[in-house]
Structures are given as structure tokens and as C-alpha cells.
Image (cartoon, rainbow, N blue to C red):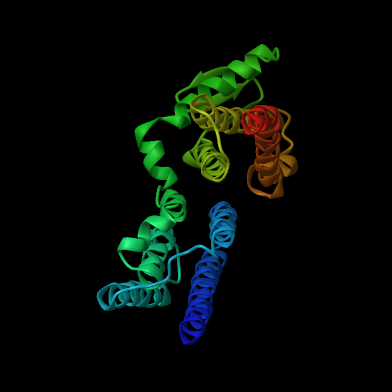
Amino acid sequence: MHRLKLVKELRIWLLGIAAGLMALHISLIWHIESTDFLGTSVLFWIAVSSLIWKKHQTLYLESSVFSSFLGISIVAWVLLKSARIDSYDPFLRLSPFVSALGLGLLASGIKGLKQYWQEIVLLGFLVIPPSLILALIDFTSLTAKFSVFLLWYLGFNVYRQDLNVILPTGIIEIGHGCSGVTAIVQLLGLAFIFLVMFPTNRGEKILVPVVAAVLAFTVNAARIVLLAILSAFSNHEAFNYWHGGDGSLIFSVISVLIFGFFCRFLLLRDEPEQQKSGEV
């Protein structure tokens, strides 16, 4: 009876610490006004919380003195480091992953960390900055080339000069912010969440991230095409709206919705197969 009481108290303490770390992380991102990263972080925290809730009754909660000390030290380091952040800091990408490790050690020790491998792997995805992908693949140039192709296909007299998309009456330059890398990382994150949370076969594990990347790239290119057309017609107000205002978020929502329908289609398609295997 006494042990059950201790376990319940431990669960409450762990829940409080976890909720505090999540709230701190989200509030810091909100403070620096990073809309894309905020949305991605919230989705990942929701996914992790859902996974923990599904198995909270079966979790092994017992930690050694060393593991508890290490876990508390990690959590304390995250709190101290976070208290000094007043602008964008790469630590904001690392802190969820580190926090998960600290909480895992505090809750279940080193041996029990394997219970949380899904959650730790998910939060590890947030560590990857879009700039790293941009350094590996020149999406800026690819976006410029593909946008020019789309405009040409639509019948516009267009050509490209380096990163400039040039129409007879307007020109736009494709910067890093318009490369689509942020959108690609966002959809790849959703794909990663989907693959971790739902059973998929080997082919789907390859197909889902490929569809996510291609979809995000294509939707962003469509946005560039729209911006080029608006620039050609000298519609500066509409250009500013679709470039940096709420209009840019609309394209993100469109890509997320399309990808959501795709994932839903996969789940519905796999249901009959799972039912047949269950009957057998």
C-alpha cells in the first residue's frame, strides 16, 4: 500500500515536471515569434504526450540514486539554460530531447530508458535545423528552377538568372526563406510522427517521407509562382500578403491538410489487411 502511494506521488511529480518543461519550451518559442518552429514543436509535444498516456499504466517507474541525480542535473541544466534565452538560440531545438532524457532517467533509470525510445527519437527530430538540410541540398536553386518551369508551362515568358525569376514586367529573387526547406522539415516531422505512432509496412516507411518532402516542395513552388505573377502585375499589397503575411501560412496549412488526407488514406487502406491478419 505504501509503495502504491509512492508510485502515485512519483507520477504526479513527473507529470508536473514534464508539463513545466513543455510549457517553458513552448513559451520561449512563442516569445521569439518563430511561428513555424512553434507549430512543429506543439505537434511533437502532443504526439509524445499521447504516446506516454497510452502506456502510462505499464511503465516501469524505479530509478537508482545515480540515475535520479543525473536526471535531476539534466533537468536543472535545461531550466538554467532556458532562463537565459531572450532570442533565438539553437538550444531551443536541443532542449526537448535533453529534457526527455532527463525525465526518463528520473522516472525509470538508465535501464528503463528503452521504454521511452519512441518519445526520445521523436523529440530528437526537433534537433535538426532547416539550415543543415539547406547546406546539404541547394533547395534555393531547385525552387527557382522548378518555379520557372511551372511559369513556362503556364504560358508565361519567363527565364531564370541565378536565383532570380524574371518576367517581362517583374522579377523576384528566391532567398533562403523562400526555398521551402522549413516547409519540408515541417512535413517530414509530421511524416516521422505518423511512422512512429502508426503501424506501417516497409514500403510505406519509404513512401511517406518522400511524399511529405515532394508535397512541401511543390506547394512552396506554387507559392513562388503566385508571387512572381503578382510581382509582374505590380500588385504589391497582395505580394506582401502572400510573401510574409498570413498568406504564407495558408500554403503551409494546405500542404499539411493534403498530407493529412494522404496519411488517412494509408490508414484506411491498411485496415482491411489488419482485420484479415487478425482473423487468421
Give me the residue at 54% from left, 59% from top.
55
The relative height of residue 85 versus residue 152 in the rendered view (above or below) is below
Foreground of the two, 171 or 48: 48
Is 230 located above or below residue 103 in the figure? above
Q: Position of residue 7 (x, y in %)?
A: 48, 79
Give the mark count: 0
**Where is the C terminus found, in terms of image quarters?**
top right
Across and down, in percent, residue 192 comes to 51, 42
247 to 277, vertically: above or below: below
117 or 209, nearer to the observer: 117
Determine which quarter of the picture holds residue 74: bottom left
Pinpoint residue 141: horizontal percent, then vertical percent.
45, 27
Q: Where is residue 2 in the image (x, y as percent from the top left)?
A: 47, 87
Residue 185 makes an appearance in the image? yes
Is any part of residue 164 visible from this angle? no
Which residue is situated farthest in the left direction here?
66
Taking the view exactly as shown, the residue that stands out farthest to the bottom is 2
Q: In which quarter of the image is residue 131?
A: top left
Above or below: residue 182 compared with residue 83: above
Residue 205 vs residue 234, the one in the foreground: 205
Please state which of residues 186 and 59 is positioned toward the viewer in this rendering. Answer: 59
* Lateral position of residue 105 relative to residue 248, left or right: left
